[in-house]
Image (cartoon, rainbow, N blue to C red):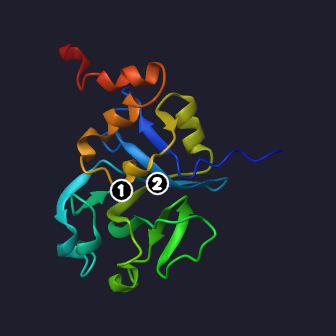
Amino acid sequence: MTPAPSHTGRLLVATPHLTDPNFARAVVLLLDHDAQGALGVVLNRPTPVEVASVLDGWADLAGQPPVVFQGGPVALDSALAIAVVPGEEGHAEPLGWRRVHGAIGLVDLEAPPEVLAGELGGLRVFAGYSGWSPGQLEAEIAEGAWYLVDCESGDVFSPDPARLWRSVLRRQRGPLALLATYPDDPTMN
């Protein structure tokens, strides 16, 4: 039996019918996807909490807006960060950064920020994450809760996260592009 393809580095875009408040209109970057399950962070849920108020030294490296994002409903009392390091795969990875997919990687927030300061092309901090047990995500995709699409470099650090759901859908081909105009409340249409 061949293993299912990994979707690490791809985006999950909530369908308009996904009404769970944790994921309604969410865009999730999958940081890990294998036979043991999946882990990702919601890219479009900024909080009012500034990075400077919770992590010393990292605020200067954070992209706009420089706030903590709610990565998902799991472990909201913990923080993780993702960052882009320009350059090709195969080059030495900077200390304190581990490649996830392409130029996107996880940052060790225990490392001194000045070690990575010259290496990062962008940084975003997340409180919590989104997780799925083995087979759970595949079942949710099959039942129509998520669209699985390719990630583009600007998605991770979108300066306007409130518009990310619509902009990711808008660039898709075919019927998915039309969903970008789906009303927030179809009963008001």
State the image coordinates of residue 110 (x, y, percent, origin top left): 39, 83
Identify the residue under disc 1. 71
Residue farthest to the right? 1
Q: CA distance from mark 2 to mark 1?
A: 8 Å
State the image coordinates of residue 70 (x, y, percent, origin top left): 30, 56
State the image coordinates of residue 183 (x, y, percent, origin top left): 25, 22
Q: Does residue 17 appear to the left or right of 10 in the view shown?
A: left
Say which label, 2 or 1, has the lower sequence index: 2
The amino acid type of the residue labelled 2 equals Gly
Compared to residue 92, the image places residue 139 above or below, namely above
Determine whether label 2 and label 1 are within 8 Å by CB: yes
Query: Which residue is painted at 18% across and 16% down in the image?
Result: 188
Query: Which residue is painted at 34% across and 26% down in the image?
Result: 180
Q: Quadrant of the N terminus?
A: top right
Q: Residues within 10 Å of mark 1 (few under 14, many from 20)?
A: many
Residue farthest to the front? 87
Query: Which residue is painted at 51% across and 41% down in the image?
Result: 150
Compared to residue 151, the image places residue 119 above or below, namely below
Compared to residue 170, the image places residue 66 above or below, namely below
**Secondary structure found at label 2:** strand
Q: Does residue 132 appear to the left or right of 185 in the view shown?
A: right
Residue farthest to the top? 189
**Secondary structure found at label 1:** loop
Q: Which mark is residue 40?
A: 2
Residue 24 seen in the figure: no
Query: Which residue is painted at 36% across and 56% down in the image?
Result: 71
Q: Which mark is residue 143?
A: none
The amino acid type of the residue labelled 1 equals Gly
